[in-house]
Amino acid sequence: MATIQALTAREILDSLTIPTIEVTLWLDTGAAVVTSISTGTNTGKFETTDLRDNDMQHMVGKGVLKAVKNINEIIAPALIGKDPTDQAGLDQLLLDLDGTANQAKLGGNAIIAVSQAILKAGAIANNWPIYYYIQQKFQLTQVLAIPTTIFCMVDGGAHGSDNLDFQEFQIIPASFMEYPAALNLAVTLYQKLEEVLVAHKAIHSTGTLGGFSPNLMSNVDVFDLLIETIKATQYIFSQDVFFGLDAAANEIFYSSKYHLKDKNQAYSSAEMLEYYKNIRNTYKVIYFEDPFTPEDLNSWKALVADIGTTTLISADSLIDSQPIRTETVLSQKLANAVVLKPSKVATISELFKSVSLAKKAGAQIILAHRSGETNDDLIADISVGIGADYAKFGPVNRQERLAKYNRLSQIYLELANQRKQTEPIIETPVTPAETTPAENTSENAAPDVPENQPDQSQA
């Protein structure tokens, strides 16, 4: 049995130039794993504590040297000699070392970084790909398949340049598409959208995530431009591709109302509900993420009741990936889908508990990135290993996003090859009268059975 031999952490920068944590873990077999955690532009009210130095002389107060020190001096010694496959036991050890309800002592960012390293170490100790290790060990899905992908095309809100109110305008390839075809669609539309923006003499620079950040008169203008973009390709709108919207309602809610540039007067909760229903019908928006604030619970429930049978109403800030919040929100029918992000919880075990609760409730699961990302591609493996319905890793731009999409491409090939190897080769019997010397040579042997590609999740 492999055991943990050493563990060390250091401060690195994420894609927003915000300090974050990288952990390297060595096993006594000589194998090593490296992992890093993402950060968010805004911290959710329910998520684990992100411990920061608050030293204005270092990284404008956002440094994580305290959290790094906690890993190196407190956590690491406690893990030496431990079995990396004991994820639940070691995660509980991490929580016990902290001893606070929200991981304020050692830092939730320190604990999840180590928990991720333990997950990777458990996989390498078994000599398995991480997605396969997750499936085998945690039994959250019986089928390994690439999730349907949600691609951000346009950045707005806190991710844009104060030109659009909503945070992400997304495209969702039809679920019948295999992953390579879905990725091709996203790349094609991303590049074609730039041409359309240039033709309209609109700004075609990119925002925080790498999506375009054009200067438009209203939010719905984005959908019109996207439809124009789709029509300029081989794809068919509302057949091959649909729209999604991350409203990030916290960012547009103040003075007790929702504020959009679409009109001079602010929107009441009831008016906002009608707004979403209208763009659902007009623009085939089949995915709404954080359409209301976490306090506007009646509106959440009303939107699910009105369009939830045909549309995903997805909760991110309403649950912040926490198991107890996931269970409560879904039991009250405030959402029918959940966005899960590893760095919002303290341990991998808690993340997987949220997955289990969501599946038990029949909700759809979206494994998602954060605004501040690193090149770590672990969430791609997690999305496959838990059987997520969707994977949301941002635009097909910026290396920290592409690392995840490229990892999905690699997993896709591995799954396809595995299925090909396990399929029996069916040979057609040949009667003696039909047999000739040439037919018995290896050059004329029966060809391999065509690849049986993994199924896509249903949209």
Image: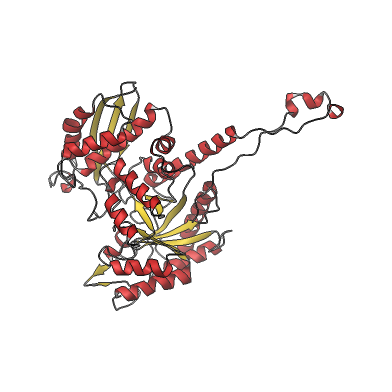
Question: Which quadrant is the N terminus positioned in?
Answer: top left
Residue 240 x/y as whole percent: 55, 59
265 above or below 141? below
Residue 275 x/y as whole percent: 38, 73
188 above or below 223? above
The answer to which of 381 and 68 lies nearer the viewer is: 381
Q: Can residue 12 be seen in this view?
A: no
Residue 307 x/y as whole percent: 43, 68
* Residue at figure coordinates x 55%, y 64% from the top left: 231
* Residue at figure coordinates x 31%, y 54% from the top left: 327
In the picture as drawn, the residue positioned furthest to the right comes out as 433
* Residue at figure coordinates x 33%, y 48% from the top left: 354
* Residue at figure coordinates x 44%, y 69% from the top left: 280
Whether residue 105 sits left or right of residue 364 in the image: it is: left
79 above or below 331? above
The answer to which of 205 and 284 lies nearer the viewer is: 284
Q: How is the image coloured?
A: secondary structure
